[in-house]
Image (tube, rainbow, N blue to C red):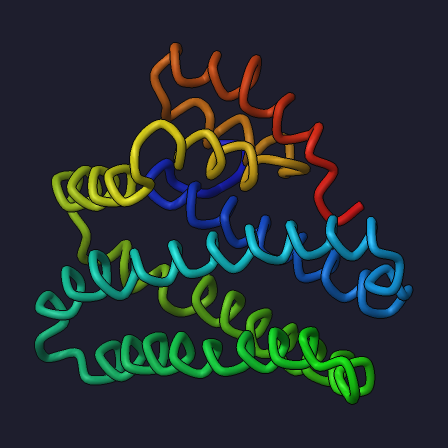
C-alpha cells in the first residue's frame, strides 16, 4: 500500500490532515487581518464553524464508540490503558480552548488582542494531540481491534453523520486538499455510487463555498 496506512485507519489520518489544514487557515485568517473585512470575516467564520463541527464529531466518535471498545481489550496493559486516559484528557482540554477563541472573536473591546494568543494555544494543543494519537494510540488500537470491530465502528460513525445531508458536508470537507494518495485510498473503501457522488456533486459544491477565503 502506497500510504503505508491500513484501510481501517485511513479515514482517521485524512480527518487529522483536514484538521491540520484548517488550523493553518485559522492562523492565517487571524494573522493577516481577514477578520476585519466583513466578507472575509464571514468566510472565515463559516470555515471555523464547520471545523468545530468536524472536530467535535471526530472526538465524540472516539470517546463514545472507539475508546470504550478498545479499553476492555487492554487488561494487563497498564501503560496502554494510561495512554487512553491521556487521549480522553486531551480531548477535554481542547474544549475550553475553542471557547476562548469564540469568546475573543465575539469581544468588541479586547477580542483583537486576545485572539492571536488564543489561536496559538489552541493550534499547539490540537497539533500535539493529533501527533500523539498517531504515534502512540494508533498502534495500540490496531493491536486489539478486529475486522468486526472496525465494521461496527464505521457504521456508528456513518450513522452519526445524520444521513445524506451530514455526509454531503463531511466527506468533501475532509477530502478537500487531501494528500492524493491518502485521498484516493480513503475513497477506495466506499462503494462506487458514493465515490461518484462525492467527486461529481459534493466536492464541486463544497469548493464553491470558498471557506476561509
**Left or right of residue 2: residue 106:** right
Pick whichever, 108 or 24, lies toward us.
Answer: 108
Residue at image x 50%, y 72%?
A: 129
Tell me if residue 78 comes above or below residue 164 in the rendering.
Answer: below
Q: Which percent across, then down, holds residue 187?
A: 46, 25
Task: Please tell me which residue is depicted at 29% across the width and 56% down the height of the picture.
Answer: 61
| 50, above or below 96, in the image | above
* Residue 85 image offset from top left, x and y in percent: 28, 81
Which part of the image, by quadrant, shows the C terminus?
Answer: top right
Task: Tally the marks.
Answer: 0
Q: Residue at x 74, y 56 (%)?
A: 25
- The x, y position of residue 80, in whole percent, is 25, 77
Q: Nearer the viewer, residue 21 or 185?
A: 21
Rendering coords of residue 210 (x, y %): 74, 37
Relative height, residue 179 to residue 88 (above, below): above
**Which of the 4 image quadrants contains residue 90?**
bottom left
**Foreground pick, 16 / 213:** 213
Q: Quadrant of residue 118?
A: bottom right
* Residue at figure coordinates x 47%, y 52% from the top left: 54
Residue farthest along the front direction in this orientation: 108
Amino acid at each position: 500500500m502506497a500510504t503505508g496506512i491500513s484501510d481501517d485507519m485511513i479515514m482517521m489520518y485524512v480527518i487529522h490532515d483536514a484538521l491540520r489544514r484548517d488550523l493553518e487557515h485559522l492562523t492565517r485568517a487571524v494573522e493577516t487581518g481577514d477578520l476585519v473585512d466583513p466578507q472575509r470575516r464571514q468566510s472565515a467564520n463559516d470555515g471555523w464553524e464547520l471545523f468545530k463541527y468536524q472536530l467535535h464529531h471526530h472526538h465524540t466518535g472516539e470517546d463514545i464508540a472507539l475508546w470504550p471498545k478498545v479499553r476492555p481489550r487492554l487488561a494487563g496493559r497498564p501503560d496502554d490503558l494510561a495512554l487512553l486516559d491521556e487521549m480522553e484528557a486531551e480531548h477535554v482540554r481542547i474544549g475550553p480552548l475553542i471557547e476562548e477563541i469564540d469568546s475573543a472573536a465575539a469581544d468588541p473591546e479586547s477580542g483583537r488582542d486576545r485572539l492571536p494568543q488564543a489561536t496559538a494555544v489552541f493550534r499547539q494543543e490540537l497539533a500535539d494531540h493529533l501527533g500523539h494519537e498517531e504515534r502512540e494510540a494508533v498502534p495500540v488500537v490496531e493491536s486489539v481491534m478486529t475486522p468486526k470491530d472496525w465494521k461496527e465502528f464505521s457504521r456508528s460513525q456513518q450513522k452519526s453523520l445524520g444521513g445524506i445531508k451530514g455526509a454531503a458536508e463531511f466527506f468533501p470537507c475532509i477530502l478537500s486538499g487531501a494528500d492524493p494518495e491518502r485521498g484516493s485510498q480513503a475513497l477506495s473503501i466506499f462503494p462506487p455510487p458514493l465515490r461518484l457522488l462525492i467527486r461529481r456533486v459534493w466536492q464541486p459544491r463544497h469548493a464553491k463555498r470558498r471557506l476561509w477565503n
